[in-house]
Amino acid sequence: MMTKVELETFVEGTTHYFATAANQPASVGSPYIVQEGRPTVQEFTGLISIAGKRRGIVYFTASRPMLTVMLMRMGETELTQENMCDLVGEVANTISGNARRDFGKDFMISVPTVLAGEPEKIVTPDNIRSFVIPINWRSHSAQLVVCLE
Amino acid sequence: MASANAKAEPLTNGKLKLMICDDSNIIRRKIERELQIERLQVIATAANGKQAVEAFRKEPADVVTMDITMPEMDGIECVENLVKIKPDVLILVISALSDKATAIEALKKGANGFLCKPFTDRQLTEALEELLRGAGNDD
């Protein structure tokens, strides 16, 4: 079970990512537990598997319109499906990698797996609670989902 | 295959050769686009460590930006390989892995600097300038 302090690491990482890479701060809400069913999955999802000291998954999921604006804010001119897949993977990778500042080197992260749609392919372990960190950026919303033993 | 002490052929315009290695196309393009140091010219990009070593053997760069978490061959192993090929190459690791142990390991393998993702354009420029200053390549 994750602690409040551990969740704060991901909230801070998300806040830092948008302020720095997307050139505009996001409103990052308080994490909440998914009570029933599976966490939200939007059009594009970047997923990182965690191994080592902790096990589980971290994923960032967002809509095409939000990713389009993020790419534009980053100065990218090629607003392609490939770059949107790349971006969700990079967001998930960056926030997970930054978490090693607090979790340490044994918090081992995989290269990103990227999914366009296909929510059935995202499997969160049944015995672990998933926390959703809501992200509001400009008029868009996205989610960072953290599911760790 | 290049020798263990391959020397880079200087560019005719006197600029230093830069190779960008990152599995993210967005990051590779961002570094290339935002590069504000006139002394550097991008000669190659690579999406993983294996590609980077192959490109480096064909044409050794003077300066390399290197991600760590990549498929095929990670950045730490790649740094070790590049330094074997060209010991005086300058390598700036640009990674999201922000724990001290990873930075220390990269530096021990031969990297010269570490920039944490996410980064601003200004932070990238400053990190590269510091890398060049450290090597005595400042103007």
Image: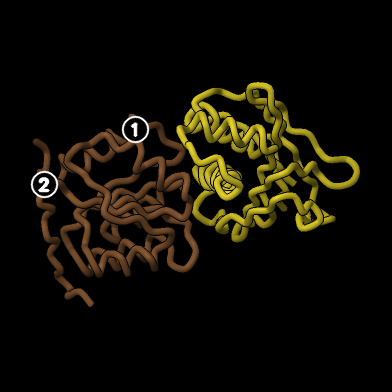
Identify the disc placed on residue A116: none
Where residue B6 sits, quadrant-wise, is bottom left
Q: Residue at x 57, y 50 (%)?
A: A82
Residue at the spot of label 2: B13
Where residue A66 sits, quadrant-wise, is top right
Q: Colour of chain B?
A: brown
Q: Residue furthest bottom?
A: B1
Identify the disc placed on residue B123: 1
User: Where residue B135 appears, x then y in whole percent?
Assistant: 14, 46
**Taking A66 as reference, is A125 left or right?**
right
Q: What's the residue type where badge 1 is placed? A: Gln
Q: How many numbered circles does the render carry?
A: 2
A19 over B40 or under it: above or below:
above
- Return the residue nearer the eye: A17 or A77: A77
Chain letter of the residue carrying label 1: B
User: Where residue A91 appears, x then y in whole percent?
Assistant: 57, 42
Q: Residue at x 64, y 23 (%)?
A: A27
Instruction: Specify the chain shown as yellow.
Output: A
| Label 2, label 1: how far apart the Cα atoms are | 26 Å
Q: Residue at x 36, y 38 (%)?
A: B33
B3 over A41 or under it: above or below:
below
Quadrant of the image containing the N terminus of chain B: bottom left
- Return the residue nearer the eye: A145 or A117: A117
Closer to us: mark 2 or mark 1? 2
